[in-house]
Amino acid sequence: MNAQEAKSKRMESSFTELLRPFRISHSIRNSKPFRRVTLLSFFLSIVILVLFAPLATAQFPEQGQIWKSYNISAYTQGVTNTSRPEQAILDAILRQTGHNVWCGETPGMLIVKPDVVRVYHTPEIQEQVEAIVNQYIFSGNRTITWQFRVMTVNSPAWRAQTASFMRAAETQSPGSSAWILNASDVPNLIRIFQERYGLQQVNSPVATVHNGQPITVNLTHPRQYVRGVYPDPNGGGFRTATGLVESGCKLEFTPLVTGDDRIVDALVQVHIDNLERVYDVNFPTPSGRSGSFKIQTPRIDQFRFQERFMWAADRALLISVGITPSPIPERNNVPGLSALGGDRVETLILIVRQQ
């Protein structure tokens, strides 16, 4: 039997199944109402077969995909500071393999549960996922302490004075730079910033985090403005409504230190939101009443940075995210900032592992 005959036989079988509910007694079949219903059903069946037969025989393109499962319970069961420790592994897989791998031309599936990662994809992608999972399993879920310094300087000229004890690291984001230095050279670096480059420190928090899990250093504070005038729901007039802008710097750090304590593999994200000023508008009282309301339109300057870095765990990482809005909004009038243009500063992030 050739392919065409096989297809015809399948269609005939499908048609027979469609008509099975209409196998009724001889007396009912001969009635005029039944013949009309049967004729209508026949034509509907033909339409259904023509429209949906191609879908019934369609198959996903096979490109060597296989199912594999990876047990991650050895890592996730020891993480106690979050209800979903497996989320860090999911984020790492999507980030390192690329989101298009899971929704492109090659069908794939990624399922991450608290104790297992299940993957349906090609052997090449399986190898990548296995390597990522093994990074977490072999690195362990122990806690590690880090110190963060979020700083600003008023000139990039400091590079000339520090070149002797810092080694450049590669970055991809436009305007950014990074360096690796010995932890023992950090005090000298800070001294140079203080003496000649108008150092301002947003904060220097120390935080302990489970290896491989993200931590957020939130150095923002709310700034309020009047955003509009609305009818009072209780009646009797109108009221002003306020809005909030979280102004300042937010640092998100996701570090994974290898099991032998030699290498740090970390994702660094920096969000800066600066409410530069508000524009006041005298808004007339609605409904023609006398008087007015003052409403405000904020001017918000935003900056976003994201990079992945690898460096020796016994060294420090210094990142210049570039010339940015000040992450210290209340200190915009620091002398010397005009050298970089208005309230622009060079924002620096210093990350050191605490032994």
Image (spheres, rainbow, N blue to C red):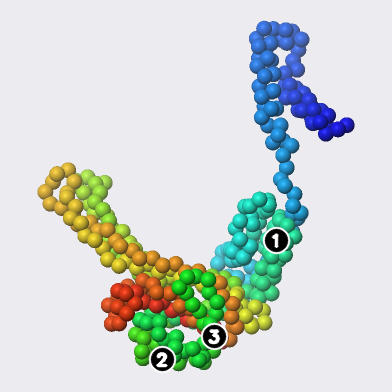
Q: Nearer the viewer, residue 247 or 121?
A: 121
Does residue 67 sit above or below 272 in this rendering? above
Q: State the residue position of label 2.
A: 191
The answer, for residue 86, to whether it is visible in the render is no
The answer, for residue 33, to whether it is visible in the render is yes
Give the residue type at disc 1: Ile
Figure quadrant of the N terminus? top right
What secondary structure is found at the residue carrying circle 3?
Answer: strand
Give the residue type at disc 3: Arg
Precedes in sequence: disc 2 or disc 3: 3
Question: What is the count of numbered marks?
Answer: 3
Structural distance between the alpha carbons of marks 2 and 1: 48 Å
Precedes in sequence: disc 3 or disc 1: 1
What secondary structure is found at the residue carrying circle 2?
Answer: helix
Does residue 54 sit above or below 333 in this rendering? above
Give how far across and how far down residue 61 sits, in percent: 72, 47
